[in-house]
Amino acid sequence: MIQGQQALGAADSAGASLRGRRIGVSYESSVNLFCRDLTAGVREAAAARGVEVLIRESAHSSERQVADVAGLLADGVDALVISPEDPTALTPVIASGEERHVPVFTVDRATDGPVVTHVTSDNLLGGRLVAGFLIAALEAQGTVAVVGLQGMSSVADRVAGFRETLAAHPGLRLVAEVNGDSDRRRARAVTTEVLHAHPRLSGLFAVNDVMAQGVLEAIRDVGREESVVVVGYDATPQGCEEMMRGGPLRAEVAQFPVRIGRTVVDVWADYLRGAPVPRRVEIPVELVTRENVGAFTGAERLLHTRRGEVWTAGERVIYFPVRGYQMMLNEIHAANPDLLRHIVYRSGFVLGESIASQVQDLYPDPRDRLFVLLEDLCRGGFGTFEIVSLDVAAGRAEVRGDNLFEAAIAPGLAWARTPRAVDTYCSGRLAGYLTAIVGRPAVCEEVLCQARGDAYCQFAITVEER
């Protein structure tokens, strides 16, 4: 345990000691659903305490992450939360944080250097759950392989737990461990090699869901869907949907990154109060199988996409990006409402097309990608969405939206309080999504609208004629 800093005053509460402070967060990419969920947890816990959150994405570059963290320190943040890209590369800049009396916390992946607390999933347990499932499914007989990832402490723990449990069952042998490099194509290639080298392979453990998709593609390529049992890790919406479809993917280990994000802010609050804080906090994981996926709480994103919420002083709010941009839109709203609607639509379109392009490799199936994009939209606070139809060849899609107008709008955004601002922005996002998915410009028309008295909103997205 580490003894935290002394409280600023005897009367200070956790909220009072944090209010007005700033926390810097550095992670690999918001394309990664785990990172987005983790950041949502940090934002939620920080907002409840009046803390500002500064986000930096390293885009998988350790050099950029080092520069980002140094920049956050130069900006005067009061704490750092880091998911390290390269643990060794960050050591000097973390030491610099200690010299400035800025506490550093790591999440998901551990790093070298003076860190107050590391908050992560219980990955050792996760590996044990994977092995236990395969032992039961294969009756402790046969051969298995791991498609892993080098250089990550969280993955090393998963594989260690897997090996430890497997060792007690000599009838089920680990015959290969290969590096899928957290890349779908790479995982597909190395899995194909393993399947050819071990024609009687009976089980595969993919250490994250990106690689699980490549593993499944390789199994289908060689026609081994009936003979190989696959267990993945993350239980993303795509992984849950794969389990529900049937096929080789039989189970997933679910992590809870939102809980990790909340917990690291809680630990920081304890540290500032002077309370002892642990060196390491492990958040429990769960095994999700084809039999229980329907009841799994994380699958709400899959089964009933829920509205994303941020809570501040008890009020649910939508935060639109970039404060200066928000104020500019207020000015345009006052001068020309029609121009405002055009700008809001185009803003949604550009962002939607950009996000849809970024996740193309993660979700190459068009329906999977549209589903994940709608999930991301609803998590931003814009309502509940459902795919009514999608015809990629014809370039058409219909999406139903509910409760788009229920969330309160962040204070000071007069433009966003106009009757059609939210659905106009959503229309732009949907058109941008289909443009990226089909590869041709698309437009979106709102054919039904709750603001006009209809029971729900319905959007028709159509790709323009060549």
Image (cartoon, rainbow, N blue to C red):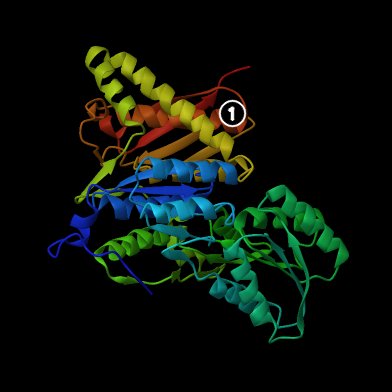
**Which x, y percent locates residue 459?**
42, 31
Asked if residue 197 is positioned above or below residue 354 in the image, the reply reads below
Which of the 4 image quarters holds residue 159? bottom right
Q: What residue is disc 1 on?
A: 395
Which residue is painted at 52% across and 38% down in the image? 389
Q: Is residue 176 visible?
A: yes
Q: Quadrant of the C terminus?
A: top right
Which residue is painted at 69% across and 53% down in the image? 181
**Which x, y percent locates residue 346?**
43, 22
In the rendered structure, the answer to whether residue 74 lies left or right of residue 247 reads left
**Which x, y percent locates residue 275?**
28, 70
Q: Residue furthest top?
A: 335
**Which x, y percent locates residue 329?**
30, 22
Of 325 and 129, which appears nearest the observer? Answer: 325
| Crowd around label 1: few <14 · some 14–19 · many ≥20 (10 Å) | many
Of 95 and 185, which appears nearest the observer? Answer: 95
In what element is the residue under mark 1? loop
In the rendered structure, the answer to whether residue 20 lies left or right of residue 462 reads left
Q: Looking at the picture, which amino acid does disc 1 mark?
A: Gly
Of 430 and 286, which appears nearest the observer? Answer: 286
Which residue is painted at 25% across and 22% down in the image? 330
Q: Is residue 82 visible?
A: no
In the rendered structure, the answer to whether residue 36 lies left or right of residue 340 reads right
Which residue is painted at 29% across and 65% down in the image? 270
